[in-house]
Image: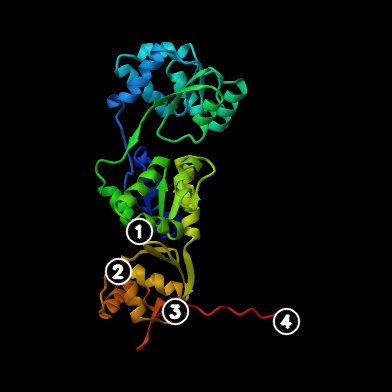
Amino acid sequence: MDEQEHGPLAGFTVGVTAARRADELIALLRRRGAAVVHGPALRIVPLADDTELLAATKEIIGNAPDIVVATTAIGFRGWIEAAEGWGHGEELLAALRDVELLARGPKVKGAVRAAGLTESWSPTSESMAEVLDRLLAEGVTGRRIALQLHGEPLPGFVEALTAGGAEVVGVPVYRWMAPEDTGPLDRLLDATLARTLDAVTFTSAPAAVSLLSRAQEKGVREELVEALRHDVLAVCVGPVTALPLQAEAIDTYQPERFRLGPLVQLLCRELPGRSRVLPVAGHRVEVRGHAVLVDGALRPVPPAGMALLGLLARRPGWVVSRADLLRALPGAGRDEHAVETAMARLRTALGTPKLIQTVVKRGYRLALDAPTETKYDD
């Protein structure tokens, strides 16, 4: 089995905090070999039940703004569909036909046109910063601007418009709240703390805030921050999503294009690049999160075995005592026989027993190959 057969993320476990489009992200990760722990950090308020969106819709129908900014395609479509469900669809479309309609990017422009409307302008960069620059350059003093929100914070956007003299009306499409069932999120949190996840993905800033808040409620916020700072990769779809984590001094990784596909591609580069690759007993051994590649063949290893192998790999070629290995075993107690049992299972899982040597009365070590000496002519 080679890299192409088992996928670049085989042997790694990735946490997914997304609620919306979670199935798409999980499918992308599994297609590349990753194991996935899904703990939705949010739930979306159903549009039909969203009284805040209904109130904002009626306000725009009754008092049309000068400018409407559409920020996301799914959000704009959802807004129009919700208005139709409430019996206000035609009234809303009529109000939007008479305003300056700005669409952030090609996808949003497509949603606007699908509704039978025409955008006044759309930036090619898909950047809200460019939208803001245009508005401020035109002048917003005394103008009423409706901003279609989508759960994501827009740092400084509303403040800059207000400072420029505009009245900003928020249209809260797809508001996000904490999940009703916190069980899956708690399992993801526990896996992060236990370092059994190699990475956690975030596709919205509210999801990052929600995970931190849940950790606070359980009294483990400091431990979560420590895990994300040093052991578990925090991967965000974009810079806005990363802000709550960066405020905690957590280094985040983001793709150049703020999409799910590039986010998964980033993981495919970063996680294998962090693996420990060692020449052992004539074999190429790559230690991943919950599996090992031996000469390119994927060998799933149970958690106890991974704990032992991880410690041996951190001290390649050195003898590690049974006492040290026992401390690395999760919940092993004081019986060193547990090390022998876990070691036997590890060797079986690796399929190549000679990778790990027993050093009588001392412990175990990886059978690290001696470095090849290079001869130089005088």
Indicate the position of residue 40 as horizontal and vertical percent values.
32, 44
Q: Which amino acid is tagged 1? A: Leu
Indicate the position of residue 230 as horizontal and vertical percent values.
45, 60
Which residue has dot 3 on it? 367
Which residue has dot 2 on it? 330
Earlier residue among tags 1 and 3: 1
Residue at 48% x, 67% y is: 277
Earlier residue among tags 2 and 1: 1
Q: Which amino acid is tagged 3? A: Ala
Q: Is residue 218 above or below residue 133?
A: below
Q: Which of 22 and 98 is in front in this view?
A: 98
Q: Which amino acid is tagged 4? A: Asp
Name the mark on residue 377: 4
Give the Cα distance between marks 2 and 1.
13 Å
For the residue labelled by badge 3, is the local secondary structure a helix, a strand or a loop?
A: loop
Give the Cα distance between marks 4 and 1.
53 Å
Q: Is residue 116 left or right of residue 191?
A: right
Q: Is residue 95 visible?
A: yes
Quarter in which the N terminus is drawn: bottom left
Earlier residue among tags 4 and 1: 1
Residue at 34% x, 18% y is: 83
Quarter in which the C terminus is drawn: bottom right
Which residue has dot 1 on it? 193
- For this orientation, the residue located farthest to the bottom is 361
Mark 3 burial class by Cα count in 10 Å: few <14, some 14-19, many 20+: many
Res 150 → quadrant:
top left
Mark 2 vs 1: CB contact within 8 A: no
Mark 2 burial class by Cα count in 10 Å: few <14, some 14-19, many 20+: few
Give the Cα distance between marks 4 and 3.
31 Å
Q: Which amino acid is tagged 2? A: Pro
